[in-house]
Every structure is written in C-alpha cells, then in structure tokens.
Amino acid sequence: MKRLPLALLCASMLAGCGVNREMPPPSVPQARSYTAKNELLSLNQRITLGERITAQWWTLFASRPLNGLIRTGVASNYDLAAARETLTQAQEAVTASKAGLLPQISLDAAMGRQKYGAALFGPADFTIPPFSYYEAGPSLSWTPDLFRRQRYAIERQQALADYQSHRLDAAYIALTANIVTETLDLASLNEEIAAARRIQIADEKTLELVKAAYSLGSASRLDVLGAQTQLVTDSAMLPPLEHRRAISRHALAILVGKAPAAWSPPDIELKDFILPKALPLRLPSELVRQRPDILAAEDKLRAASAAVGEARTDFYPSITLTANMMQEALTPAGIFKSAAKAWSLAAGLSAPIFNGGALTAERRAAQHAYRAALAQYRQTILNAFAQVADALTSLDHDDEALAMSQEAVNQARSTYDLTLAGYQSGAIGLLQVQDTQRTLAKAELDFIASQQQRYLDCVRLFVALGGSPYKGKT
C-alpha cells in the first residue's frame, strides 16, 4: 500500500517523457508560377496574384438564378449531408480515443452459488458446503500512457478527422462546381435550341420564297425539294439538343436534392452570367495550404506518421493499475454490514519478449505506409499545379477564340443576307443561299460553345485554386 503512490507517480512521469521520433514532415514547393511563362490573360480579364477567393466564387458571375441553385443544393444535396455526418462520426471517434488517457471507473455487482471440491484444501480433506455469495462495489482501471502510445493513437484519429473535414470541403467544392457547370450547360443548350429554331424559321421563310418563285416560274421543282431538304436537315438538330437539355435538367435536379419529375430549373441563358474581370491566383506555395485534396493528403500523411509511432511503442512495456472496493456477503442483507467490506490494489506489467518478428514487420509496414502516403501527397500537389496550369492556359486563349467566333458569326450573317437578297433578285441560285445558311448556323453554334467554354474555364480555375471554404451554409 505504501509503495502504490510511488508507482503511480513514476507511471505519470513516464507517460510525459515518452519517445516522440516522428517521420520527417514534407517540404513545401517553392515554385513561383504554374506555367513556363508568367500567368497573363487577355485584356478582358486579369490575374490578381496573391489574392484569395474571399467570397463564394460563383457569386462573381453575378447570376441570381445560379446563386439560388447553389443555396438549394448545399441545403438539400444528400452526398454533402453524408459527408457532414461522416465528419461528425470521425470527430466523435477522436473524443472516444481521448478517453483512453483517463482512468476507467465502473460499478460492478455479482451474485452466485458455488461449491468447492475436496482437493481445494489438499491433504486436510476439508470440504465446504455449497453457499451463495453477493458482492457489489466500484472498480478502477488505468493504463498510463507510457511512451506516448495512446497519444499517437489520438493523433492518428485526429488526423483522420481532419481528413474527413477536408473531404467535406472537397465534396462542397465538387457540388458547387457541378451545379455551376450544369447550369452553364443548360444555359448554353437553351441558346443553342433558340439558335436552331431561328435557323428553322429562316428555312421556312426560304421555302416560302422558293415556292413563290416556283409558282411564278422562276424556280424549278428541284429548288423546292432542295429547300424542303434543308428545312428537314436543320430541324433534325432540335431533337438531340432537346434530349441533352432534358439530361442536363435531370442532372441539375439530382445535384440540388430533388426528383427530376418534381422539380424544374429556372430558365437561364448565358447572358444571365457576367464574366469576372479579375481572377484571384495564389502562389504554388500558398496553394498547398488551401486546396482540400492537398490538405486531405497531408492529413493521411500525418495519420501514417502517427501509426509509425504506435508501431514503435509496441516494443515497450505497458503497465495497468487496478483497484476495487467491494462489499461481499453470503446473504443479501449482510452486504450492507461493515464486516463485508473488501478491497484490492494491483499493478500489472506486460512487455514483449518473443513474437516471431510480428512487431518488427508491423513497424516496417507502418514505415512503408508512410512513404506511400508521402508519395501520394507529392503527386496530389503535382496534379493540383497541372490543373491550375491547364486552366490558365485555356483562359489565355479563350478571348481570342471568342473574338474569332464572333467575327465568324458577323461575316456569315452578312454573307447570308447578301446571298438571300441576290436570290430574291434572281442573281444567285438557291444552292449558294443554302451554303451560306449552313455556314451561319455553324458559326452561331460555335459562338455559343465558345462563350460556354470561357465560363467553364473560369470555373476550372476557381476549382483548381481550392474554391471557397465550406461554412455549413451558403
């Protein structure tokens, strides 16, 4: 009894001075740019180097319908809800693991009936008749955290909880990016369908002109058939576009947590978006502290490092201290008497001596797991840099492509107007009108696609830079 406080004191001291040789932390990249040349965009957009995305990045498009869709999606999306619950589960696991540092106290009670055999007292040949027994009282058990094994376990569990937190951020970014992408796709399809219908209306007017000319004898039956064929050909563009729009609407409904049959997205066009004039850009060394996938890979690296510590401490001894105070009696009433009091104190030590090399193999396995996590961490950084570089390169050419598409539309429309007027005056044949009409249709659809691509490349850059942090609501 007199030595027990000394044992407790020594155990406490050992728990605070354990070995803490963790694996070396990864180095942070020192690159100053993402591409071989400086990040410069067109005159219509500029890069603000070193600036973070202070608000939700999709608000820079200044689209109220889009903002409403994002709010609905964040509140109702089931994948995001599952990620939130998974994070809460991981945080509770951290709380549970910390409880292992404290003594565990429980209240025990038992009752039974027992009969000892004649061999219990050896040659005395003394027997005890069967008897009933009753006992109740508290018990305490504590395993001091020698050499920080439990703290390594807590550190590993905390790293896994942080990993789930960053996975939640990644799910939030993926959700918002998918909503923006699907909304842009839907807006683009709405304009493509509108353009296809304008082409259809123009074909119908051309057919009327040809029929009128045919009735006057200035056009042949072949001209009429050609105009009808052009109308049918151009009308065939509409069903695939309508199908794609329906698929996009369904996908958007799922993203916002709604059934496609019970929800319809708002009417939206590309003109409802405003192109951001300034795009924030973090340095590569700052990006690794912002992107959720990089931070999640770092969390897995921390967990693997803590696992190495756990495997190392398995070679060291462990001490378990127990104490209990019981009331023991042969009758239920006797359990409340002072004579029924009983207690015990004990200290147990366990140390590995021989295990067939299992502990050594487990330690090597933990070290290899750390190296694998380190390689995955570095690869994640490289992938992030490549995504930013790809987005910047795409944006660098989008303005030129859009300007060329606009010029193509202007020239095609002027050519079509001239050829149509020439056909009406009899100077140009129907074939030329149809050729210029097809050219105009293609130019208009290419221009819509160029507009959409420009917005999508902005989305790619925002996502590649780590998006906006998740705050539980939007």
Image: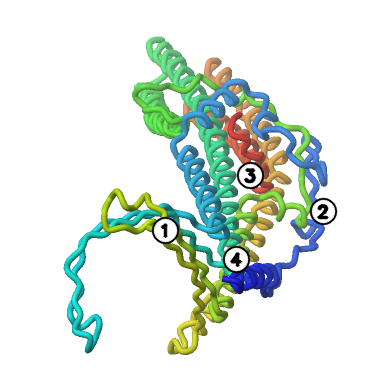
Badge 3: how crowded within 10 Å, few (<14), some, or many (20+)?
Answer: many
The residue depicted at 78 percent of the width and 40 percent of the height is: 42
Q: Nearer the viewer, mark 1 or mark 3?
A: 1
Location of residue 188 in the rendering, given as x and y in whole percent from the top left corner: 54, 30
The residue depicted at 58 percent of the width and 47 percent of the height is: 165
Label 2 is placed on what type of residue?
Answer: Asn
Label 3 is placed on what type of residue?
Answer: Val
Checking the image for residue 152, the label placed there is 4
- Tell me the SS state at disc 1: strand
- Tell me the SS state at disc 2: loop
- Tell me the SS state at disc 3: helix
- Where is 392 relative to 172, above or below? below
Q: Is the residue under label 3 in contact with that under label 1 (CB below 8 Å)?
A: no
Cα–Cα gap, marks 4 and 3: 34 Å
Label 1 is placed on what type of residue?
Answer: Lys
**Residue under numbered circle 2:** 38
Residue 22 appears in the figure: no
Location of residue 17 in the rendering, given as x and y in whole percent from the top left corner: 70, 71
Q: Is the residue under label 4 in contact with that under label 2 (CB below 8 Å)?
A: no
Checking the image for residue 463, the label placed there is 3
- The mark nearer the N terminus, 4 or 3, is 4
Location of residue 144 in the rendering, given as x and y in whole percent from the top left corner: 58, 67
Picture quarter containing residue 114? bottom left
Q: Nearer the viewer, mark 1 or mark 4?
A: 1
Q: Nearer the viewer, mark 2 or mark 4?
A: 4
User: Toward the viewer: 181 or 13?
Assistant: 13
